[in-house]
Amino acid sequence: MVGPESPEIVVDEGRLSSELESYRDWLDENTEKAYQIAEEARSKGLDFADTVEIPRAADLASRTEKLLEEYLKPTPDEDPIRIEDDLRKLLSKVDRETASIQIAVEVGKRMHKLTADVRRSIDTGLRVGLAVLTEAVLVAPLEGIGDVKILNNEDGTEFLSIEFCGPIRAAGGTAQALGVLIGDMVRRELGLDRYIPSTPEVERVKEEFGLYRKGLQYKPPPEEIEMIVRACPVMINGESTEDIECSGFKEVRNIDGARVRGGVLLVIGEGLCLKAPKVQKHTDRLNIPGWDFIAHFASKGKTEEQENSFKRRVIKTDSRFMEDVIAGRPVFGEPSQPGAFRIRYGRSRASGLAAAGINPVSMEAMQGFLAVGTQMKVERPGKAAAVTPAVDIEGPMVLLEDGGFHRIDSMEEWNCIKDNVVRLWDSGEMLVGFGEFLEN
């Protein structure tokens, strides 16, 4: 017990700091040994490559440079542009989102100075910015962008077209939206004109939203789609990702193929629409022209009364997680109804990002459907949660044959009464970090 009379705990910070430094040195030394062994094995010529492909990186700046090494080469025979030191300095002064914008513009200008290739310069800058946004640990900077093209408006002027692919989903809405903003800023620096869409191009995107069958966090109505496509200074383009084809606007200039482009819909729906406030923060701070339309989405749902006064908030039932239920999958609770899980804020040692801590008794009582690592679709806070065990939270409440009503928190209790359980009154507690609600 820790109370008013508990003795003060003295922490030897110097010793802890020394131990941490020694641990890091141990990790570095043993990593070096592992690489030496791997290089010796590869040198025998028994693998497809004679070198170890995975580079070592100490931080975000180093990861970004090594991840995009091939894109940073002005020519295949030249050494890549070094951005590690510049990016590290930027990250020490500004937040990651701001740093991603600044380093992308800088890399685009440096690449253009060396190659005079506008398309390639924008492509490299955009991928660098996206890598910083995703902490250089996702595939999005490599495979989320299929290609960057310079196309022509109907009046003959040149504009930027960014082809987004399905893997851009992994980057998240913020990176998707800021990726478009980064592309716009780099193309301005290099003198490209803005995108002026034709009516068929706008109608094609509307049709694709209507045909898309995969889950989107937000599906904008036709008027919002038209507003974004017509106002966005760059063309949000993409590769065909779905089998279904458009029929009304099948052949449209500047769009390859007739099939639905999933990357376009993700960037518009989950990126620009949902993450408009974050985009607006940067467009206002940097005074970027041509992005006034984003204010409509950033202020959507806000009223003067809500901004200037406190108002009791009613949490509405969100039944979207029930819409895609597959036959045979268990349902552990109806939307916002008693008998499902009871929310509890916190984390356990096994908790991670988008994780839900469940008492092992609850997992056992669900007949083993909930196991460690199981993905659940949940009503709140986000789209899904990975199950992890948490023994310190409450288990389910059960009704027994003899009329007894008990809460079972330990496996020992459960093993004693499991054959006498008539029904589960509720599923027990679900442990979710407060940050999950804050961010989602």
Image (cartoon, helix red, strand yellow):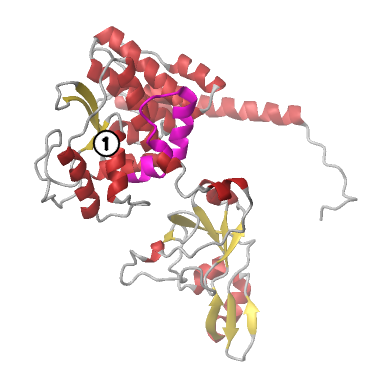
Q: Is residue 361 left or right of residue 17?
A: left
- For the point 38% across and 21% down, which residue is it? 104
Residue 239, position as x, y percentages in the image: 19, 39
Q: Is residue 393 left or right of residue 129?
A: right
In the rendered image, the vertical position of residue 160 relative to residue 276, given as above or below: above
The reply to whether the magenta stretch includes residue 386 is no
- For the point 62% across and 70% down, which residue is it? 410
Residue 198 or residue 393, whichever sits in front = 198
- For the point 71% across and 31% down, which residue is it? 16
- Residue 372 appearing in the image: yes
Residue 79, position as x, y percentages in the image: 31, 11
Numbered range of the magenta stretch = 269-295
- Going by the picture, which residue comes out furthest to the bottom? 402
Residue 7 or residue 343, whichever sits in front = 343
Pointer 1 residue: 230
- For the point 36% across and 22% down, which residue is it? 185
10 Å neighbourhood of mark 1: few (<14), some, or many (≥20)? some
